[in-house]
Structure formats: C-alpha cells, structure tokens
Amino acid sequence: MRRGTLEYCVLALLRDEERYGFDLVKALGAADGMVTSEGTIYPLLSRLKRDGLVSTTWEESPSGPPRKYYRLTPKGQRALGDFVEEWQRFRDAVDRFVEGEKS
Amino acid sequence: MNGTRHHDVGEYLRRLQRTMGDVPVDRREEILQEIEEHIAELLGEYPEATDADVRNVLERVGDPEDIAAEARERVEDHSPNQTVAVVVRPRNSWTDSAAIALLILSGPLIMFPLFRPEVALIGWFVAFILVWLSVVWSTRDKTKASLAMTAGLLSALLINGSGDEGFIYFGLILFASIWTPIFLGLKLRRASSAGYLEESSISGSVGAAPAETGRWNTNTKLILGCAIVAVAVTALLIAQSSDGADESLTHDMFGDDSPEITQTQFDEVQLGDSREEVLSIFGREGDSGSVVSGSDPEAFEEPEDVGAQQFDDCLTYSFDGSAAPGAVAVVCFDSSDEVVYIRGPRDS
C-alpha cells in the first residue's frame, strides 16, 4: 500500500514549498508507518527528478555545506493533481466497504 | 566525531556502493552523496555520538540492500501503471474479450454449416476453453454459456441429416450463436465496472497515463469490431449461399458425382416411359434439376427438336467405366412425369 503512494506524499510535501532531502525525510518520518528506511527516500527522489516531476537547486545553508532543494515542476503538479483526484475516489470507495453500509 | 567519519559509517557507505553496483553510476553517486549527507545531518543531533548512537542512526537510514533494491527497481521500472496491490475483483484480460470475439465470429459460420463447419467448431472450442480459463465469469455463467454452446454445436452436427425438425436445430444454433456472446459480453461489462476500483487504483509510477476509465474501453471496441465483422461475414455467406446453390447444381449435373448407370441400362429407356419405369430400369434416382443449356458442349448437346420443350424435371446420371469417361445421361420429364427427352454422350 505504501509503495506507489509514497512518491505522491513526497510530491504533496513539495506542493507549497521547496524542501531539501533531510527535511522531506523528517516530515515523512513524522507520519506513523510511512517510512521504515529513511535511506530509500533518496533513490525515490532521484527517480522523480529523472522523470521530470521535481527539479533541484543548490542553496547555501545557514550551517554546513550547501543543500540540494527539491521543488515541484509543472509536470509534477499535474501528476499530483491526477493522483489526488483518483485517491479521493478510491478512498471513498474503500471506506464504503470497510466501514460497512450505513443506512 | 567531528570532521572524521565514523568507521561504521564508512563501512556502511562502502557496502551501499557495492550493493548498488548495477545502478547507473551518476544515479549511484548522487544517491550515495545524499545518504552520506543525511547520515551526517542525523549524527549532528548527537554532539558526542557513541558507537551505539551511530548504529541507531544507520539503522534508521536502513539496510543497504533495501536502498539498492529501491534504486534498482526504479531504474528498471519504466512501465507505467504499476498498480497498488489492491485487488477488489479480478480484472478481465484480453482473453475474455477474445473468447467473445471468437463466439461472435464463429456464429455465422456455424449457422451455415455447409461452408466452414470445421473453422466454426475450432473457434467455438477455443472460445469454450478461454471462457473456462477466465476469472471474470462465475462458474454459473460459464455453465450457462457452455450449455448453450453445446446445444448449438450438437444442432450444427445434427441439422444436416434432419428433416422437418431441422428448424428446431436451426433455432438452437441461432440462439447459441447470438445469445452466448451477448450474455458473456454483458457479464463482462458488469465485471469490468465492478472491477473499476482496481483499474482506477493508484498508479505506482508517477506521471503514468491515467487509467482508461471511459465507457468505450479497448475491450468494448474489440467486441464491437468483431460484431461488425460477423455481420459482414454473415452477409457474405448469405450472398454466397444463393450463388453457391446454382454452382453446386451445375457441378453435380455434369460432374462425376451423379449416380452411375451402365450403357445397357441407358439404352432401355424410351421416350414416353413413366418416371417409375425409368427409376426401375436405373435402379436409383438421379440428381434432380433443370437442364442448364450450353453447360458442356463436349458431353451434352442441345438437340434441335427439343429447343422449345418444357421440362418439368430432369435426372442426370454418370456412366460407369463402360462408356466414355465423364459421360453424362440426362432424362427429362414433362408435367405428367413422362419421359420427353433422353440424352446420352454424343459419341455413344
């Protein structure tokens, strides 16, 4: 279940602001059961970049080396929009079954 | 732990690099670098990190095998629509549509068993197997369809030797070849819409083409296409059957398929004989039909004195080996069943 939806969670985290990798992982880790191995986020980010859904920029950090910031591309926004629409429909349908018929 | 890398961290990164050996180098280096920074950032929260702290941090980052697997899978996985494993109902596959398509296409062939019965039988047989292999239809639906198909197939086999009851067989064939595909098709559509949840489930690959959710999906189009082809084939077969009837009669009248008689038997027949007398001489009924003029000038020549004759019926026979090969006898009757015309081979 996590697989396949995780990348959309990443895209959703980037919807309003750009973030760097560590920040993303922390945000995902805050949700229970979303990420088991933090390291696996990076291959995922790498693919999102290759697919043109996110872009990266290097920015100076207040402390330490420069950080790689991820931001949503227009293509990423569209993909996220499509997903959200499908997800809501899917979630409602599943809810109907798992919560039982309410009269 | 400032400045220098902890021994365990170095080991961890080397292991990660090794396990990602089959990942393209630029991606591998990028991932390695980011994970190294991630570890450094995590360790930054421990000003005096102990060996146990480092181990904890590395555990949080995860097994190198898992990370490598993620990197590897994402590299290979270009295919869109890697669906989340939520199976609400089995998805219908193309073989289900193929089964219906075969049924539709075989229908007209079954209905005209004289022409291509073997093709139709193969088509129905394959469709039969595909239907039973399918996960879309329930056993009950499969049984219903199979009963109809079996009835249709048996009727197709029996209709040739049948008399008055032939129309029952024809009705059964008609029913089987029209009702079965419609029934299975409707059940398929219903199963597809029930399986909608699964089809529209979240695509695992970002940016994948949205799932085909329209009413006119590929399966529907395939079935509709086959229906159109089936109608065309039926029309063609009907057109051929009217042509073919004439052709086969001409062929039988002057071919080698007619019942054989001897020259001696032929010589006994006289003008004015009754039909019964002719049949008793020849011992059998010849092929019945009307004389086709000018069909074969070598074996059959229209005599001048019968040019205006009206024949009610003609019987044709082949001669046995005692006459010229391919020779044909024609005996024609008028409306009162009297022989008014006898014709043998010209050179007899």
Image (cartoon, coloured by chain):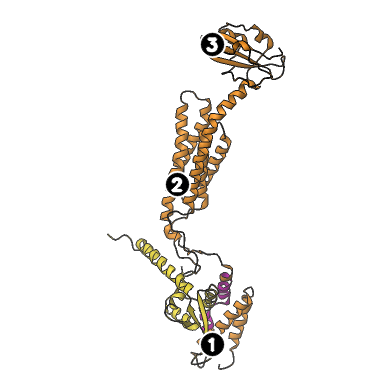
Residue placed farthest to the left in the image? Answer: A103
Q: Earlier in the sequence, mark 2 or mark 3?
A: 2
Write down which chain is painted orange: B
Taking depth in this image into account, of A36 and B343 the one nearest to the observer is B343
In the picture, measured across the screen, residue B290 lies left or right of residue A71, that is right
Q: Earlier in the sequence, mark 1 or mark 3?
A: 1
Circle 2 or circle 1, nearest the eye: 2
Q: Position of residue B124 (x, y in %)?
A: 53, 40
Which disc, if any, is residue B334? 3
Q: In the image, what residue occupies the spot 69% across and 14% down?
A: B346
Q: In the image, what residue occupies the spot 56% across and 75% down?
A: B67
Q: Which residue is mark 2?
A: B185
For the C terminus of chain B, the image quarter is: top right
Write down which chain is painted yellow: A
* Chain letter of disc 2 in the image: B
**Secondary structure of residue under mark 2:** helix
Residue stretch rendered in magenta on the structure: B56-73
Residue B250 appears in the rendering: yes
Q: What residue type is disc 3 on? A: Asp
